[in-house]
Image (cartoon, rainbow, N blue to C red):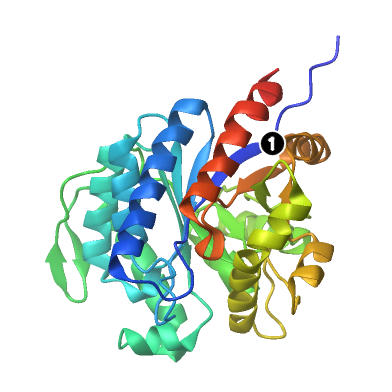
Amino acid sequence: MSAAPSAPVTLLRFNLAGPPAAPGELTARYRAAIEMARYADTHGLDMIQTEEHHATGNGWMPAPLAFAGAVLGATRRIGVTVSALITPLHDPLRLAEDLAVLDLLGAGRLVTVAGLGYRPEEYAAHGKDWDARGALQDEALATLLAAWTGEPFTYRGRTVRVTPRPHSRPHPPLLVGGASRPAARRAARLGLPFFPSAHLPELERYYHERCAAHGTEGWVMQPPRRTCLLHLAEDPDRGWAEHGRHLLYEARTYASWQGAGARSAVRSAAADTAQLRAEGVYRIVTPDECLRLAGEEGGGGALILHPLCGGMPVEEGWRSLRLFAERVLPRLAG
């Protein structure tokens, strides 16, 4: 008797980016995100995902660890991932402490993807040297791994010790992100898992080659060949007409940051909502269409809901999430 095909992973994405808004509106959106995370936790979604960006002017999540702490405190089961944290922008010792505390708070539910970032403006905003980002990343990762042992170690010429020790052993879940051979080499050298920023099988093979050369063991969390961000609606035509501009706002903002050679799982060249809809990167789908997508993705894929995308009205975000929880999730489980 053959095994039933496994369902794709279900994620709820929050970056809180959107057109400039008053503080009161932003407060409502942040609170809605936490309430949505709590709802997702009780209804069986697998993961909450957030990320880090700075110097944007549109509120794109600049403090993912603070947000992750709020989510972990409001939930009991669901995983939380920061993918990616721009590690070189953080003080390594303070980052080790913060992640240890979050790991204790969530009992190991926080997964951090350490990335370099790809916008020099973010380094300038934090007084960091863009050209030294690789060295800064090496120092940060080595410091985290040494700090989480709970033992004294040498940091910038002095002996330090970081407490408390994390909940997870040997250390909190930590992956190295990137789309380059240096990123794959860094992960392999440290014996850390690798998270390519796009579907890059050749880079996965290279990572395993470098693991063998270093005598380390690791694994790759490879994004699926096709990544799409979902919004659920009973009537997708009406959804695009009324809310497509929110999806387009995020798509065009993100595309403006990506150079010609950038490799990303989420990449759009759309100039208007009609082109965005035709691309299929951002999708408004019915529950039945979402289930068909789930069947196509299978166990190696993901269903990524983005309920507050690009300034989407909170009430519309709730409609999308409830449609997914009430009319998709039970049938996925079945």
Which residue is the extreme one toward the top? Answer: 1
Horizontal side, residue 262 vs residue 100: left or right: right
Q: Is residue 125 above or below residue 217?
A: below
- Say whether residue 149 is visible: no
Residue situated in front as seen by the camera: 11 or 178: 11
The residue wearing badge 1 is 8
Horizontal side, residue 159 vs residue 42: left or right: left
- Say whether residue 13 is visible: yes
Horizontal side, residue 313 vs residue 182: left or right: left
Residue situated in front as seen by the camera: 313 or 277: 313
Residue situated in front as seen by the camera: 311 or 12: 311
Percent from the top left, x then y, of residue 72?
33, 41
Count of all numbered marks drawn on residues in the image:
1
| Residue at position x 21%, y 76% in the image | 156
Q: Is mark 1 on a helix, strand or loop?
A: loop
| Residue at position x 21%, y 44% in the image | 165
**Quarter of the N terminus within the rendering:** top right
